[in-house]
Image (spheres, rainbow, N blue to C red):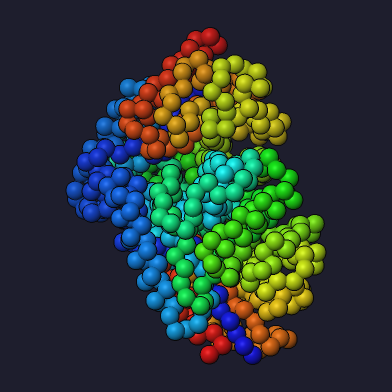
């Protein structure tokens, strides 16, 4: 069986980078200098993945949460109050969506931002690089919006598409941290020219995803995997826990994969690794690299 | 201490720089005790000057942070590194790797100091079992229930030892203990774990007044629904943060306090409310009139013997000066209402 591995989302920073950001917050480090430190850490992260073929996103060291930089570059979205991220002890700034009028700030070039480390949005890597976006469904559910969902979805997917084109990136991970309701429908038609890996949370219902995309990567249940196969070119499963410091057993994961009725599969993790101490996240990546070998 | 509208603090207060800047470097040394005691004494002076009836433990000067302080003193918890809470703010989140047990009493040193100074109007904050469970990684116990109950057993042991210490100085007097449980309502389907672990924590401990402190809950009703099942005497809660800054005692002026009607409907066991009347996340010092309106609105819902007044949460988020001003206005508002009640 062909096993592809995926690491996505905000990755925990090193202590050194935390200190740099702390100095930047106190205005003791200029934006450009911080940008240099962030770039250097991102390159180091990419080097740690080199050679093991893991698909990955930018580690988003300059994203304070998975929504904020996108809010800040979008004309029509403001930052709202600090809000709890799901049931965790972590918080994000709730987006206040008035409209979506395109990009107010160029995401590709260096640019200082208020209330967030500076742009660029991503530092692209080589062949295994994916852009990262919150899925429109979770973005909407985590926001206060003056738009109805259909208008928001159309607007935000256009924005995502424009960002991908501006960067020249062909692949993107869309992340849905909020579980789907039965009547939720995610229509990614406006992103059909890109290879989309959609990471979902919780139970999937057949009607949740319109059409077929490259991959739906779901929590492991037989029904979720059935839907993932139906909706994906390559089905995917989350078999690593991003909420636990306990290390999984690679042998157990390999055995689970062997039971799957498919020729290709994408294996990823439950929740992005920013909820773990850095040392544990590094160990989990090392573990992921050994899956299916 | 009067019978009505007792004023109290919740827990933490801003540390003086001479302590905060060296805290981690000197932790556990003679210097740590010397500076923590000095800061406690200064903070208690400030609390008294502001008019507080209950001085807590003098602003938690012996503690850096509510989770970390206790977890550091427990066997079976390993720290792998900090975890982000928001922006560039981090907290130490421990991993339970084996059966947990008490390595060193969490708060005896602090209580010993307060008793040596003859303070009796105190309230000891102790981080509760559910929050200790929720804020830890678990690599060892079967599930979240078992983990919370393991913490409850430790807290029961700790509170028994605090009570013995208290009895050696003030036999027959009640010891006030506040179980800090900010995580209480974060998992609505786990309220039974909250109830069982809190009850296990206080099991068999006589002669104490137990309260819980909860703040920034998205739904206090979850707590109100089960409060009669929890063996506590009162609930010290945050309200000012969710209220408006407009004066008035109508429902529309006081949206932050309106849910107390629901509380009082269910309050068959006459538990008291520690009413958060000042917001600890803004520098704006609420005027006496606004605080009086918040208290008077509440007194239209429940009798004064069931109401105490306090800040929403620990005031360590504000400067010492602003913290003092907020407490002072709270005391003035309370005193004016007491006069009016008489």
Q: Residue at x 64, y 90 (%)?
A: A1
Callout count = 0
Residue B293: give x, y in percent of width and height.
56, 17
Question: Which is nearer the eye, A138 or A172?
Answer: A172
Q: Is residue A110 visible?
A: yes
Q: Is residue B199 visible?
A: no
The part of the image, by quadrant, that contains residue A146 is top right
Question: Which is nearer the eye, B239 or B30?
Answer: B239
Q: Residue at x 53, y 46 (%)?
A: A104
The part of the image, by quadrant, that contains residue A3 is bottom right
Please indicate whether residue A133 sits to the left or right of residue B103 in the image: right
On-image quarter of the N terminus of chain B: top left
Residue B162: give x, y in percent of width and height.
40, 47
Q: Is residue A218 above or below residue B265?
A: below
Residue A182: give x, y in percent of width and height.
79, 59
Please indicate whether residue A90 sits to the left or right of residue B169 in the image: right
Q: Residue at x 46, y 72 (%)?
A: A125
Q: Is residue A237 above or below residue B119?
A: below
């Amino acid at each position: 069986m062909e096993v592809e591995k995926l690491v996505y989302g905000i990755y925990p920073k090193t202590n050194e980078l935390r200190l740099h950001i702390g100095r930047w917050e106190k205005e003791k480090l200029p934006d450009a200098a911080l940008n240099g430190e962030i770039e250097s850490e991102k390159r180091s992260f990419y080097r740690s993945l080199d050679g093991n073929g893991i698909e990955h996103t930018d580690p988003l060291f300059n994203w304070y949460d998975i929504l904020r930089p996108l809010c800040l570059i979008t004309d029509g979205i403001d930052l709202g109050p600090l809000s709890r991220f799901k049931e965790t002890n972590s918080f994000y700034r709730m987006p206040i969506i008035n409209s979506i009028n395109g990009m107010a700030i160029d995401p590709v070039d260096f640019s200082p931002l208020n209330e967030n480390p500076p742009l660029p949005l991503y530092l692209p890597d080589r062949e295994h690089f994916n852009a990262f976006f919150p899925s429109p469904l979770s973005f909407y559910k985590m926001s206060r919006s003056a738009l109805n969902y259909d208008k928001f979805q159309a607007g935000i997917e256009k924005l995502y598409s424009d960002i991908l084109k501006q960067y020249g990136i062909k692949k993107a991970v869309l992340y849905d941290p909020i579980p789907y309701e039965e009547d939720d429908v995610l229509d990614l038609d406006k992103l059909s020219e890109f290879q989309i890996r959609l990471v979902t949370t919780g139970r999937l219902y057949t009607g949740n995803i319109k059409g077929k995309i490259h991959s739906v990567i779901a929590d492991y249940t037989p029904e979720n995997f059935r839907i993932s196969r139906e909706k994906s070119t390559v089905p995917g499963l989350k078999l690593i826990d991003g909420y636990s410091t306990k290390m999984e057993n690679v042998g157990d994961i390999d055995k689970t994969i062997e039971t799957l009725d498919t020729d290709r599969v994408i294996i990823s993790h439950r929740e992005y690794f920013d909820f773990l101490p850095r040392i544990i996240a590094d160990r989990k990546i090392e573990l992921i690299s050994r899956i299916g070998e | 201490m009067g019978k009505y509208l007792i004023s109290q603090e919740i827990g933490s207060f801003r540390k003086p720089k001479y302590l905060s800047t060296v805290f981690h470097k000197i932790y556990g040394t003679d210097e740590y005790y010397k500076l923590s005691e000095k800061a406690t004494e200064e903070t208690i002076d400030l609390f008294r000057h502001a008019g507080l009836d209950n001085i807590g433990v003098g602003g938690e000067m012996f503690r850096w942070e509510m989770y970390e302080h206790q977890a550091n003193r427990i066997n079976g918890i390993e720290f792998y590194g900090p975890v982000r809470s928001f922006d560039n703010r981090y907290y130490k989140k421990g991993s339970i790797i084996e059966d947990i047990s008490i390595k060193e009493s969490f708060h005896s040193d602090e209580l010993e100091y307060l008793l040596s100074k003859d303070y009796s109007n105190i309230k000891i904050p102790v981080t509760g079992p559910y929050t200790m469970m929720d804020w830890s990684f678990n690599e060892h116990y079967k599930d979240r229930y078992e983990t919370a109950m393991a913490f409850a057993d430790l807290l029961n042991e700790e509170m028994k030892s605090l009570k013995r210490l208290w009895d050696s100085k003030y036999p027959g007097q009640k010891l006030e203990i506040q179980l800090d449980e900010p995580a209480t309502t974060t998992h609505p389907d786990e309220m039974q774990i909250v109830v069982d672990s809190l009850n296990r924590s206080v099991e068999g401990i006589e002669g104490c007044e137990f309260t819980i402190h909860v703040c920034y809950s998205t739904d206090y009703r979850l707590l109100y629904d089960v409060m009669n099942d929890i063996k506590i005497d009162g609930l010290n809660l945050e309200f000012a943060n969710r209220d408006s800054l407009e004066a008035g005692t109508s429902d529309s002026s006081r949206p932050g306090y309106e849910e107390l009607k629901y509380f009082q409907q269910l309050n068959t066991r006459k538990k008291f409310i520690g009413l958060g009347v000042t917001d600890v996340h803004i520098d704006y010092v609420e005027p006496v009139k606004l605080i009086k309106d918040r208290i008077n609105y509440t007194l239209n819902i429940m009798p004064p013997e069931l109401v105490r007044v306090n800040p929403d949460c620990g005031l360590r988020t504000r400067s010492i000066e602003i913290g003092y001003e907020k407490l002072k206005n709270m005391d003035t508002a309370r005193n004016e209402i007491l006069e009016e009640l008489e």
